[in-house]
Image (tube, coloured by chain):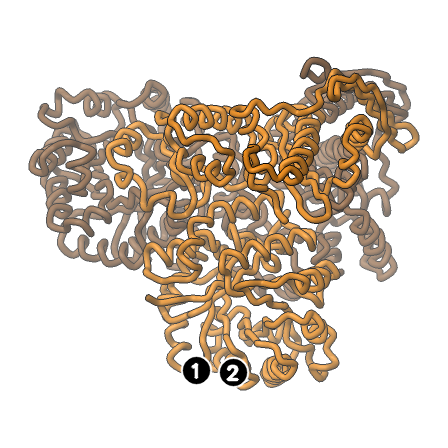
Chain colours: A orange, B brown
Amino acid sequence: MTKVEIYDTTLRDGTQGEGISFSAKDKVKIALRLDKLGFHYIEGGWPGSNPKDLRFFELIKEHRLKNARICAFGSTRKPGIAPSEDENLMQIVRSAAPVATIFGKTWDFHVEYALLATLEENLKMIKESVAFLRHNNMEVFYDAEHFFDGYKANPEYAMATLQAARDGGAARIILCDTNGGSLPGEIFEMVSQVSRTLDVPLGIHCHNDSELAVANTMAAVQAGAIQVQGTINGYGERCGNANLCSVIPNLAFKCGVASLPEESLAEVTELSRFVSEMANMHPMNNQPYVGGSAFAHKGGVHVSALLKNPRTYEHIEPEKVGNRRRVLVSELSGLSNLLYKYRELDLGLGLEKEDNRKVLEELKELENQGYQFEGAEGSFELRLRKAFHGYKEPFSLENLKILIEMRDGTVYSEAIIKMNVNGQVVHTAAEGNGPVNALDNALRKALEDFYPDIAGMYLTDYKVRVLDEKDGTGAVVRVLVETGDGHCSWGTVGVSSNIIQASWEALVDSIAYGLLRLETKDEGDPKKITGVFRGKC
Amino acid sequence: MTKVEIYDTTLRDGTQGEGISFSAKDKVKIALRLDKLGFHYIEGGWPGSNPKDLRFFELIKEHRLKNARICAFGSTRKPGIAPSEDENLMQIVRSAAPVATIFGKTWDFHVEYALLATLEENLKMIKESVAFLRHNNMEVFYDAEHFFDGYKANPEYAMATLQAARDGGAARIILCDTNGGSLPGEIFEMVSQVSRTLDVPLGIHCHNDSELAVANTMAAVQAGAIQVQGTINGYGERCGNANLCSVIPNLAFKCGVASLPEESLAEVTELSRFVSEMANMHPMNNQPYVGGSAFAHKGGVHVSALLKNPRTYEHIEPEKVGNRRRVLVSELSGLSNLLYKYRELDLGLGLEKEDNRKVLEELKELENQGYQFEGAEGSFELRLRKAFHGYKEPFSLENLKILIEMRDGTVYSEAIIKMNVNGQVVHTAAEGNGPVNALDNALRKALEDFYPDIAGMYLTDYKVRVLDEKDGTGAVVRVLVETGDGHCSWGTVGVSSNIIQASWEALVDSIAYGLLRLETKDEGDPKKITGVFRGKC
């Protein structure tokens, strides 16, 4: 079976997409997830271009990766200077990443118009930059920018630039369709030609400006490329990059080309949604393989045939990529996902049919309302415990008021809260940096005498997602909260058309789950219902 | 120059997409637009399947189309009856459409599992149904459902079904990749084989389940198909159909294959947005050719090259499809993005060094605070106008209060606002579905007597992003608001550690910019400072 390497550039080229930005910590979270799934290379950023990317390379050093090698991106040196005088190349070296990926000019027109260098100097820049990074003990990948346009315009010069990269010691040469304007047939032809004449393994890097990035990437693999570059969900500059969530399953299921370990394929859907959550982008419903509609059947003819045999209207089984069939007539859809999920929780719930049905109904109802438990394992477990084990939070709200006043450009926020905690009424108030912060402060104040451990838990993330955008500020919102205690962290969720109520739900869950965790951790009584902790440690 | 026919099925297959539905009147509007642009065939619906589709065929008869022929969709007759006894075929005849498009089974597996008929009976159903519609003076197109899967499984039988359609008198035979699982190479091979052995012109109908619908469609055209079926924006069942907004420009600009008249190509972007408006779907920002980001440049390297020559990072000129270049200002961008941006705004700012420096400093400072103007051109322009042209909003806030009360699980939100509008003090209040909605309502209420145009502007999106996660609910948040007036939309932004203040800023900008837009549009005084409108239209 043929095998290709997967090179992910979500953290670099992906962030060139409009509306996409990640904090350095988000980037680390994504990199760890990609590593876990067996991605071979992760391009972390361009250390010479901005401080956030630099920070990523510092943070990622603290982690031991199992599979992936981290790549630092940059360009060939500036014209007329030595590589060691080039700040951009020096930042790549300082990043201490094991791999350097640098791009250089292939297209004579670009050398003239964009680079303002001679054709000869450009060849030197490529060779010397690659060699310099090699001498600094980095594995070097060379991105031949605009390769296909350049090759069409001046094939001799384009090949000379690749030869320069090879002479400098590049371990891979990546042919880039930077403007996204090429066709699969052209890509196949040109990659074939290059692979016949150059003794360096080739990679492919495509953009989606003609809606052909996936097809072009596959054509290149067919022609001999052994490295595939792309991004999760196809995020990237303009129309995006080749979408790895489509390329990887296409190669595996349709071309017999292996890339990620087989067991990782079933996690592609979850990966896609995790990254869109991190990017705070709406998941694309009709996205192939991983979209919510990818295996959703609406036509009556289709549904009736599917009931007879799913192969009638599905090109692959949705489970292969961790997605699921959605058929409105069948309430049994998604049962296996659910079973999987709560087997994992090990709550001692029998796997009886009646239980399955009850959990499924509850979950369907919640999903209809807009809940999503992917980043909110805490809330998911609390709901299961409530449904099957009579769990109740040890505190409940009587009522709350929030006052916000804006005067002379300054905002004052105050929350007044009346709660029942372990049978006692607590009535207190707190100020905050905004209404949700005031609420959080008041809730903690009301509980801290009873549960001093709360002082050690703090919110690490607070995300708001508008679900039905069309209603503007009146729409239903989902609030995702992440809470940590310095070692572990857990996610909780709230949904409401009122941001305050949604935040309240997520905050209550975050504390209730934190307390439950301590409780089940401290007791150590094997007869007690314990949960495998679902957060991240 | 080769020529293909464009067959649009947005009104039928498009509506199988999740969340897509059109009223019969919407369908007529879309059909008229497609006709105007020179589409050759428009599939209006399946008259035998629902009353809305029937209504369309009645309504469209009242219009005289210039270019397009209307097609009524349906299936071959049921097993064991005469065509004239088949209600579905009779409805096609009654639709009085000039063209009938019927689908039938190609794949032996489907005949057995879905149709529950014998292979022989299926052939009769195809031939007799086509012949029956021909006798009723309709032009008949035959959709060979699951052609590619069927041909792989049993090529002799697959070919026999096509032969049956030919013998019945089909004017076109359309090869369908119904499950969307085929690859371009396979499609090319199989279409080539069929076109060598069958003397009926071929069409192609692809689905996007492998993100290959556009590539597959083009492969079929290369192999001899002369009709292309697809939908606007690729709407359709599951992952959608072949996206005509990509196929048409790809064929025209990259393959030398003509379809629509040349002057229609420059209207593809408008068509795409019109149809998404009709479908009440958010336009896909990164959609090739027609998306708001399709020619949007974020990386500093790209922008500095574009200033020298746009061809450096664009595969075609955006004007060719009626789109336009946009330069995004973000942390990834350098001075060149900014220069480009305000050249474009044409605010009469000289390009003097001192100005550049001032704008850049202002912008850097704002970015440090967490502003991002990528999706917020409205706020960006307002800030430039304030900095250099003494622009002031025609209204200002004196103070505001928000009261939120949660009791018995229900939340009440109320905003009280005191403003100065054109020198008059307005003091009013409004309730809302959450504090930000209450604020939005109160602001509009305070302004609508003075600016009745506000009633035509509505919020289409509201996004909240927490910037420094470490501080949890006390962190700085960025609120992005998108506002539309039915034709155009514009983004505005607010940043604060208080979500209410950030939302207030974005809301104020959204209305101020909307008013400014109307003003600069209506006046037409060349001496007045006008801005090219920077939103998406």
Residue under pointer 2: A166
Q: Are marks 2 and 1 in contact (CB under 8 Å)?
A: yes
Q: Secondary structure at mark 2?
A: helix
Are the residues flagged by discs 2 and 1 from a single subunit?
yes
Q: Secondary structure at mark 1?
A: loop
For disc 1, the chain is A
Q: Picture coordinates of residue A68 (x, y %)? A: 54, 64
- Residue pictured at 47% horizontal, 74% vertical: A151
Number of the label disc, if any, that sits on residue B25: none
Instruction: Calculate the distance from the C-alpha at mark 2 to the C-alpha at mark 1.
Output: 8 Å
Number of the label disc, if any, that sits on residue A199: 1
Q: Picture coordinates of residue B311 (x, y %)? A: 57, 63
Mark 1: few, some, or many residues within 10 Å (few <14, many ≥20)? few
Q: Picture coordinates of residue A390 (x, y %)? A: 57, 22
Mark 2: few, some, or many residues within 10 Å (few <14, many ≥20)? many
Q: Picture coordinates of residue B514 (x, y %)? A: 72, 33
Q: Is residue B116 above or below residue B285?
A: above
Q: Is residue A22 above or below residue A454?
A: below
- Residue pictured at 50% horizontal, 75% vertical: A172
For disc 2, the chain is A
- Residue pictured at 35% horizontal, 67% vertical: A2
Q: Is residue B248 above or below residue B93?
A: below
Residue A523, picture quadrant: top right
The amino acid on which the numbered mark 2 sits, given as a three-letter code, is Arg
